[in-house]
Amino acid sequence: TRKGWRGVWVGLVVMLLLGELERSWGATIATCNVRNWSGNSRTDSEVGAIRVLLERYDLVGLQEVLDVAAVDELIGQLGPGWGRVVSAQVGTNKMERMAFLYRTATFGVVESWLYADGKSASFEREPFCAHLRAASAAVGDLVVCTIHVVFGDSLAPRRAELRALADVMAAAEARVPGAAPVLMGDFNMPPHDGAWGDLQAAGYRAALEDAAYRTTIGDVSLYDNIWYTSVLPLGPTAGAPYVLEFDELMFPTRDVASRVVSDHRPVSLLLGSSPAPPPGPPNSRTAGTSGFAGLPRGGLGVGAWGAVSRTTSPWAADDGAGPAATLAQHFDVLAFVGDSASVLELSLLAGVLADEFQAGAYVAEHPFLYSVGAAQRSGAQFTVAAGAATCAVFVSNTAEVTLCALGAGATAAIAETAYTEAVGSPSARGHVLVAGSFDSDVAGAAFDGVREAGAVSLVDTTGTSRTDGTGQLRDTLFGPAALAGGATLLDGRVIPFDEWFYAPATAAVDARELSRRRPVRILLENGGGFTAAPNCHLFFSKYIEGESWNKALELYNPSDSPVPLEYVSLGKINNGGSTWAEATFLDLGAGVLGAGQTLVVAHPSADQVILDAADILLGGMTFTGNDAVGIACDGQMVDVVGVESEVVTDGWRVGDTPAATQDAVLVRKPHVQTGVGEDWAAAAGDSRHNAEYDVLHPASGDNLLGLGSHYADPTILGRRTTTLLISEYLEANVGFNKAVELFNPTDTYTDLAGYGLVIAGRNAGAFGTGAGVLAPRDTYTLAHPRADSAVLARADATDGALNFNGDDAVVLAVDGGQTVVDCVGDPLAPPASGDGYDVADVADATVDHTLVRKPTVAFPNGGGWARSASTDSPSLSEWDVRPISSDTLGSHQFDAGEGQFCTLYLAGRQARRVRGAQAGNPVDGGTPEQTPYCCGSDANCPANSYCDESKSLCMCDEGRDGDSDCTQLLDGVTGEDTGSPAAPAPPAASPSPAGAPASAPASAPSGPTPVPPPQGDFDAEGLDVGSPAPAPSSATTVSRALVPLTLLLAVATILL
């Protein structure tokens, strides 16, 4: 099969056409050095580009073939109608093979052989010969030999092999009498060297004798040639010898051309008595005048391509992307109009260009493909003309354009609307361009409305955009009339890729693998080139320093634009003893780090769990805990772990964890959205709450899970929440032993900045922006600065305003103290005894006692102290009253699974929710009707509902909920429900996702246990607790999307 290049029927049509053409003029023979070609040296896409070159010939001799697999891959892409013969390996210093490819409708192989059976002392690599019989009597039999002459350390070994070629051809003529002899190959010498004398004396002449020809790219030398005698039936004009300057016709730089195809150009001759078309456009014989090389450059190249009605649809990953990427690489910004390419295809092209062709970093953002080395996209895409056109702003130095790509079925009226609306859009910047593929001539009267709107075709309307060369200009870029007449527009034309890529005789058919429409291109002045700084918005999201070779760094791009990796490197300072200017840096190669994606760089000998997540393996990843590492982008340090010129013994502190960079995993907290430059202190913080990293020791086992995905939530900072609760209270009646511990029962990080403590109407510890964030299931302890050493050792912060007695209500509040979240004591009434508040069955429990919140309490009381203390029903109190002690201060035992299951209402969640009441979607803990929201106050409930404190459940307020939204949200729990939902038995504990805490009761350590973000059935307002999703498998590509895990949050109802 053709592996996706063409359908079988198309292949047959091409064979028939070529057969007719061959009978008209004979055959085209060629030679090509394919530069160290093995089955592993080229990707399938690169082989696709080679195929485009070679399929124009009927017979090709190949040199520098390293294995048979390479030739078979090409045969597979050429499809039915092609054959090959491949030599055995030859050579001493370098083993190679040679081969002949032939069109079976034109030639058949009678036999093939190595000269002297591969045992000649005259050659480093013996020539390979074949007897071929042409289908055309005008061509007859040929005996063809090919060779890759040794290069050597001097000219002497080359000249020796050239002289011996006379014996090779004499033996070939003797073996196949009457056949026309042909010698082709890479001779590593020009045809005018005296060493050719013996062959010339035998009657041979070179097809290329004119010194103006050059067969190596860059026009360096004339080493490739075809030698023949007078018996060879040349076509008119001495066989029209031809050098296919594919590097100029098809590629933007010689480096890319050499890497993808070869550093040698094919050379060909036409055989047969009838006139024949050449295998390519007119040959320049000099550099820079053919194909893409002849186009004006020095600006921003913007294009539009309606790659429609193609025979290769879709472009297949194993071959079709080669020719498409070859064409696409000549545009800085290319709009695929007419819905002509899918998201997958554009991503494939970007990958081929960046990784395989190494043509620079390209980004696919459907329907646009652009080079980040030439332009950057600014802002978000937007649509106009009722969604018929997708627009994006691109910036390149002084050039700024808004490019709008019309979809399928574009008309003149749609183009007019799109242009008018885009010009008036607040999202548009710079010149507005509308790209489209139409069914009529854009110069016709149908487009008068576009011109009346102020837009004209920026492409020369005398051109034709059909690959058969007929018809009118039906593809264009419309832009302001002033642009067309000004100095900013440097060029505007149709790109006849069919003429440059394919043999003229068959181009109309062959080009259809890409499109029946030619792309158009305009060149805009941009100040001489793209000089804008690349997007360097990235930072370390994970740091792994483990035993032996277990070293890895995860990079994350938080922006909405890709980061070009060619500008990024990783730096290391050994033992922190020098500056970043003297550091060792590791390049990351080409490609891009996509928006919201991670890149994992690891040592190649790391454990398999790390290798499974790695995108790049570098032997230079050999840092230890006292080596500073950093990210450099465009010459600037954008993020670091460690400090330059600072020598530490084991590692640097993170928060309150010493030597945290040794044998540890550092996980960047989700609210962090930028690197710290060289300011490590900003990332390290001075407590675990304001440090930007969570620290996991050791760097092994489950702590390595999750590598390759990063949970980011920029809304954490500044987001108002009412979910924290007071988990421990310590009051000594004499002295200053006063402390309050807060606990975060949720599965998200919570900003402490909005919270404060209020005592007797005065502030007693507003936490402020420097306090940091409170991790899931973690505590924050505030103490008086004159408390005893045992208390201070467990405190996260001290505040002299935290001075209270047992008869003072301690209130946790938000909104500047105006909204009560939780309390110890009644803020509206002093204790009846005058000494302290009673709790459960303990009198004056808030005096000289420690109060510890019970593990089943998952919600603050919202100011409902009486219910929280529960003196009437001591067993239902939320508090354990203990003798004064600081032993449990700084940790909290939490197990909501001991109580009734209900759902925490999380205000401001930005995600999709699938309602638990839907059929087939029950929620853990019972039927949908048994899934209410728990509450301690109205603040814990959705809009149009209130907290029924007798049940600790959110109930719909029928008077405020005329449209029944609340009823739907609460899954049938309404204010008219007179009975509490049944309390189902807790389900069996589910396995915790990677990095999540187990569901069994446990005392939270002094540091947080990182919890992945919730996922599943939730909307912008609430979270339905459903079955946890399985943990995702490790991802292994650069284009890795965020993979959050699901947690089951089992919480207990706060009972009276």
Image (tube, rainbow, N blue to C red):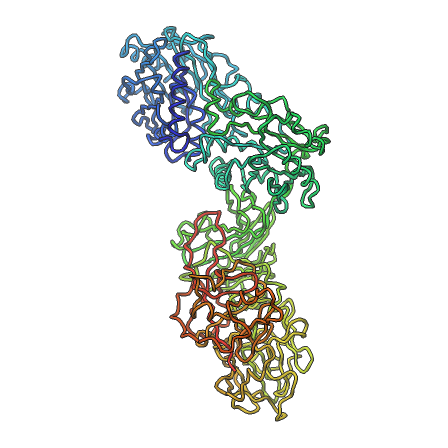
Quadrant in the picture for residue 31: top left
The picture places residue 456, in percent across and down from the top left corner, at 68, 30
The picture places residue 998, in percent across and down from the top left corner, at 42, 69
The answer to whether residue 955 of the structure is visible from this angle is yes
Tell me which residue sits at (53%, 15%) in the image.
212
Q: In this orientation, which residue lies closer to the viewer: 108 or 961?
A: 961
Q: In this orientation, which residue lies closer to the viewer: 393 or 176?
A: 393
Name of the residue lying farthest toward the bottom: 833
Q: How many marks?
A: 0
Q: In this orientation, which residue lies closer to the viewer: 978 or 691?
A: 978
Tell me which residue sits at (42%, 31%) in the image.
5
> Vertical placement of 217 versus 1045: above or below?
above
Tell me which residue sits at (43%, 28%) in the image.
50
Q: In this orientation, which residue lies closer to the viewer: 702 or 651?
A: 702
> Vertical placement of 629 versus 457: above or below?
below
The answer to whether residue 618 of the structure is visible from this angle is no
Which quadrant of the figure contains the N terminus?
top left
The picture places residue 257, in percent across and down from the top left corner, at 49, 29
Looking at the image, residue 819 sits to the left or right of residue 350; the answer is: right
